[in-house]
């Protein structure tokens, strides 16, 4: 913990505060020390040396550094610093506006300016005029989000025990707000990553192990595959068809969101995390960031659009079926967005899910993933739609000839269902993720009255006032739109699937659905069309077995973020890095193989 009294003393000695009398801090200091010493051991944020245990055990076995390691964080993990020199933002210069306690102070005390600094230009997808944020660099860029809340620090500590340091360990920080193509256009991310990997190979004579986490919806795998495709593609990285085979030993995907993270954030600025808060938490969240404000931020962050759901009904199901539906289910997860109305009967109010007139002249139907994608797009600005169309693709491609063509199409590179793995037969891909936490899978939505908004696709007979803003499906530039939000008032924990605060729950790691975590690993990449080089795929599931006395689950958690501190994930990373990756084998604790077999791959 920060030595608060000494900091306060320094502050008072450095600055003059008129009207404040002389303070005796001796009592404060003694009370502070008493408070620190009274904290129970399990709640001291794991800084007592237990985080080095995995590395110590590997060292006792004689394991040591074998391959250079590059860590690539997930979405929102990397800190963002202000490089803006405009007079109104100079107080932010070189301060972290994302990550760290400075961010917290600005969110609470200077919210509007903080939001303006985080927004990207909706047309260019990069910095707005007069504002510049860049990813923090170095190992510390994503070691912890704020002091005491670790992200990558446990992995770094365990690797350090087996002789890793900045000479053979690199954290590839990036601005996760920016679209995957603009990562290179603005920041040269792929060029720098390619140079780092080639530098390791030249200096140490060894291929590189890549370790990635999440990436918000597509998983960090997508960022790595983009790097690989960019490096190999003619006119981009020009590395040639054997670059990956020559430079990459293994890729370890930790909780990789290969097929989806969330779409509802772009519609209403909501996810399960926001609707299941306590009433007090919801009040604070709405007080500082309304649903509209959150949706506006998400839509400006083109990088987060890689979270859009992929594969459509072939992967996620239709109006009558989903591959992960449980026996005895009342509602199928194939209905990705459902609307309900209330019927009064002898048993009281009952939610009924079916298309019907909603009393405002509009028919609200249950929507499959394909239908929900279109409906959500219709409720987003034209700038967001154009950004999506020019940067990403979300279908499924089964033609081997077309997949070869897609190797040269950057819009396909972020979708593992529309692009092939690199032709690297000696590379290994480890899919490591958790299972055992209730996870958002589909949603109940509610609709309200018309309200002013920047878009209005719900008005009767809408017309586009500016044809350049029109798309095939979406009328723009009209004054009214229907409000929509996750129906947080609807909870039924006796249903199958269980419903909490409008979220229909399925299986996963608490954040990412099991289908997204493991579907490609156990089925998609087993097919030659998506894995022509025969990259070996190892799927290793970790059961979620948290300790109730540990604030973040302890050594056996497999929560989406906390898995980075688990013994299981750390053991796998250390083994792969030190040349013992052959000890990591397939392990299943979920029914993912059964679910994946029900998907329409062919």
Image (cartoon, rainbow, N blue to C red):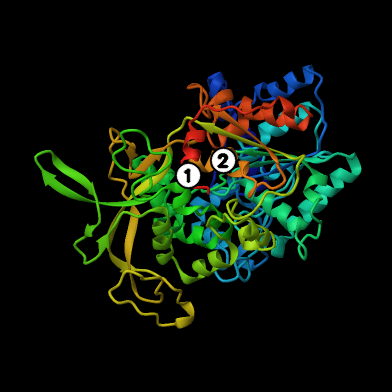
Q: Percent x, y for residue 13?
A: 66, 43
Q: Is residue 279 left or right of residue 169?
A: left
Would you identify the image quadrant in which residue 556 lies? top right
The residue positioned 20% from the left and 61% from the top of the image is 357
The residue pinned by badge 1 equals 599
Which residue occupies the foreground of this view, 114 or 213?
A: 213
Within 10 Å of the Cα at label 2, are there few (<14), some (14-19), or many (20+) other Cα atoms? some
Specify which label sits upstream in the sequence, 2 or 1: 2
Q: Where 74 falls versus 152 (above or below)?
A: below
Q: Percent x, y for residue 217?
A: 54, 49
Q: Is residue 315 left or right of residue 372?
A: right
Q: Is residue 418 left or right of residue 174?
A: left
The residue pinned by badge 2 equals 523
What distance separates the C-alpha of mark 2 from that of mark 1?
9 Å
| Disc 2 to disc 1: CB gap under 8 Å | yes
Q: Percent x, y for residue 196?
A: 81, 49
| Residue 91 visible to the viewer | no
Label 1: element kind: loop
């Amino acid at each position: 913990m920060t030595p608060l009294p000494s900091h306060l003393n320094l502050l008072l000695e450095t600055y003059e505060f008129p009207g404040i009398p002389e303070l005796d801090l001796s009592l404060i200091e003694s009370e502070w020390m008493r408070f620190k010493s009274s904290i129970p051991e399990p709640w001291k944020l794991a800084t007592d040396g237990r985080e080095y245990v995995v590395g110590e055990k590997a060292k006792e076995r004689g394991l040591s550094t074998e391959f250079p390691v590059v860590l690539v964080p997930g979405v929102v993990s990397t800190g963002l610093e202000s490089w803006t020199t405009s007079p109104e933002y100079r107080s932010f210069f070189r301060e972290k506006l994302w990550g760290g306690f400075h961010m917290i102070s600005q969110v609470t005390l200077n919210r509007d300016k903080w939001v303006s600094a985080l927004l990207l230009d909706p047309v260019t997808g990069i910095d707005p005029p007069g504002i510049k944020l860049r990813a923090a660099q170095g190992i510390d860029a994503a070691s912890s989000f704020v002091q005491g809340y670790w992200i990558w620090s446990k992995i770094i500590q365990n690797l350090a025990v087996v002789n890793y340091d900045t000479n053979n360990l690199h954290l590839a920080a990036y601005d996760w707000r920016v679209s995957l193509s603009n990562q290179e256009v603005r920041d040269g991310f792929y060029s720098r990553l390619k140079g780092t990997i080639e530098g390791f190979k030249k200096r140490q004579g060894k291929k590189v192990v890549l370790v990635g986490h999440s990436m918000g919806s597509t998983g960090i795998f997508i960022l790595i595959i983009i790097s690989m495709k960019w490096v190999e593609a003619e006119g981009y990285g020009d590395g040639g068809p054997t670059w990956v085979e020559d430079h990459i030993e293994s890729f370890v995907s930790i909780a990789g969101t290969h097929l989806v993270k969330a779409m509802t954030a772009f519609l209403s600025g909501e996810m399960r995390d926001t609707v299941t808060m306590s009433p007090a938490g919801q009040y604070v969240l709405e007080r500082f960031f309304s649903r509209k404000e959150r949706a506006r931020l998400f839509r400006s962050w083109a990088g987060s659009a890689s979270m859009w759901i992929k594969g459509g009904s072939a992967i996620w199901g239709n109006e009558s079926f989903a591959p992960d539906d449980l026996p005895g289910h009342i509602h199928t997860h194939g209905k990705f967005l459902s609307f309900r109305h209330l019927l009064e009967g002898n048993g009281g109010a009952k939610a009924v899910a079916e298309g019907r007139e909603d009393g405002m002249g509009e028919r609200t139907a249950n929507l499959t993933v394909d239908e929900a994608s279109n409906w959500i797009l219709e409720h987003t600005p034209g700038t967001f739609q154009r950004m999506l169309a020019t940067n990403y693709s979300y279908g499924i491609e089964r033609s081997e000839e077309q997949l070869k063509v897609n190797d040269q199409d950057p819009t396909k590179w972020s979708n593992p269902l529309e692009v092939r793995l690199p032709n690297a037969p000696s590379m290994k891909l480890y899919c490591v993720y958790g299972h055992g936490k209730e996870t958002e899978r589909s949603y109940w939505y509610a609709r309200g009255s018309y309200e002013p908004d920047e878009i209005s696709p719900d008005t009767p007979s809408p017309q586009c006032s500016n044809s350049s803003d029109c798309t095939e499906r979406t009328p723009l530039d009209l004054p009214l739109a229907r409000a929509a939000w996750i129906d947080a008032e609807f909870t039924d924990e006796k249903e199958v699937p269980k419903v909490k605060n409008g979220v229909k729950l399925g299986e996963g790691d608490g954040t990412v659905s099991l289908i997204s975590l493991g579907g490609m690993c156990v089925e998609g990449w087993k097919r030659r069309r998506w894995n022509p080089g025969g990259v070996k795929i190892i799927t290793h599931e970790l059961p979620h077995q948290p300790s109730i006395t540990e604030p973040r689950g302890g050594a056996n958690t497999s929560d989406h973020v906390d898995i980075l501190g688990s013994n299981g994930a750390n053991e796998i990373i250390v083994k792969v890095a030190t040349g013992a990756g052959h000890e990591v084998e397939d392990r299943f604790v979920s029914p993912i193989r059964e679910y994946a077999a029900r998907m329409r791959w062919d």
